[in-house]
Image: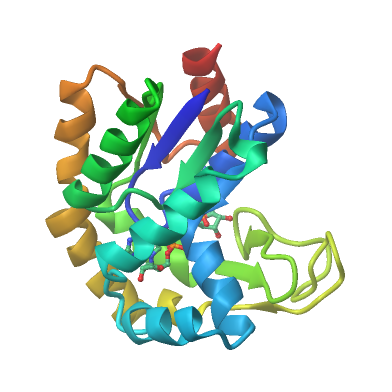
Amino acid sequence: MKIIMLGAPGAGKGTQAKMIAEKYHVPHISTGDIFRANIKNGTELGMEAKKYMDQGLLVPDELTVRILLDRVAQDDCANGYVLDGFPRTIPQAQVLDDELAKLGEKIDYAINVDVPDENIVNRMSGRRACIKCGATYHIAHVPPKKEGVCDVCGSELVLRDDDKPETVLNRLKVYHDQTQPLIDFYTAKGVLKTVDGTKDMQDVFQAVTDILG
Ligand code: ADP
Ligand code: AMP
């Protein structure tokens, strides 16, 4: 099963993708997580990506596509995957489609997690991420058991640099300009499904599993 998560930054794509990965036994692939791991490890790729991420801009398609295609070619992706944060532009979606077509494959579902802009700044300013394992929390909606400490690995929780309100507004604009057109792209392919992302995360997941079966 090959699934794409669509939606504004902070809509809950990662939260739902993690739950999908667990239930359906497919890897959760987040290009944002791959870039952040590279930044943490000080790689050349990380340094290049950071220039864009810090401004709320998209990392160039060429670089992003290369990373993603390498990742989905790995053995654990043989039975599918859930992509979170990719594609984010029409050219990215087109390359993915073309590469899958060469293998006689296609995306089965594009799940659009729909959350209005008004809710997004609150979602992102309350998001806290573990510096070590990447687990995410929300200070009001999904709090960790102990403030500032990851439930999973005990490391420190931080506000992502690009979750500061001024950057969030840029990211939302980028989303509307460059990523939202993917809704029409996947609608035309007959695979788009929309869920109401303003509901409680378990209710959103119920809607997702109703779609995926
Ligand atoms: P995305 O991957 O789309 O950027 P996340 O999954 O990281 O978004 O979610 C953004 C923030 O909102 C996180 O702090 C997360 O804990 C919280 N969150 C996710 N889903 C919900 C929900 N249904 N209701 C309330 N808060 C949520
Ligand atoms: P995310 O963790 O998905 O919110 O992504 C964080 C940041 O990483 C984005 O704001 C972009 O700068 C960059 N990024 C992640 N995925 C992509 C992508 N598919 N295309 C371009 N940039 C991306």
Given residues 75 and 162, the one toward you in this image is 75
Residue 69 seen: yes
Q: Is residue 30 above or below residue 207?
A: below
Residue 12 seen: no
* Residue at 32%, 80% in the rendered image: 52
* Residue at 26%, 50% in the rendered image: 92
Q: Is residue 176 left or right of residue 55?
A: left
* Residue at 55%, 82% in the rendered image: 39
Q: Residue 143: where, in percent of width, then height?
A: 70, 60
Q: Is residue 152 above or below residue 157?
A: above
Colour scheme of the picture? rainbow
Q: Residue 24: where, in percent of width, then height?
A: 66, 25
Q: Is residue 205 above or below residue 114?
A: above
Asked which quadrant contains residue 26, the reply is top right
Given residues 109 and 7, the one toward you in this image is 109
Q: Is residue 89 above or below residue 159?
A: above
Q: Residue 168: where, in percent of width, then height?
A: 33, 72
Q: Residue furthest front?
A: 102
Q: Residue 2: where, in percent of width, then height?
A: 48, 28
Given residues 85 and 210, the one toward you in this image is 85
Q: Is residue 207 left or right of residue 193?
A: right
Given residues 4 and 10, the one toward you in this image is 4
- Label tally: 0
* Residue at 14%, 44% in the rendered image: 181
Q: Is residue 48 left or right of residue 201?
A: left
Position of the C terminus by quadrant: top right
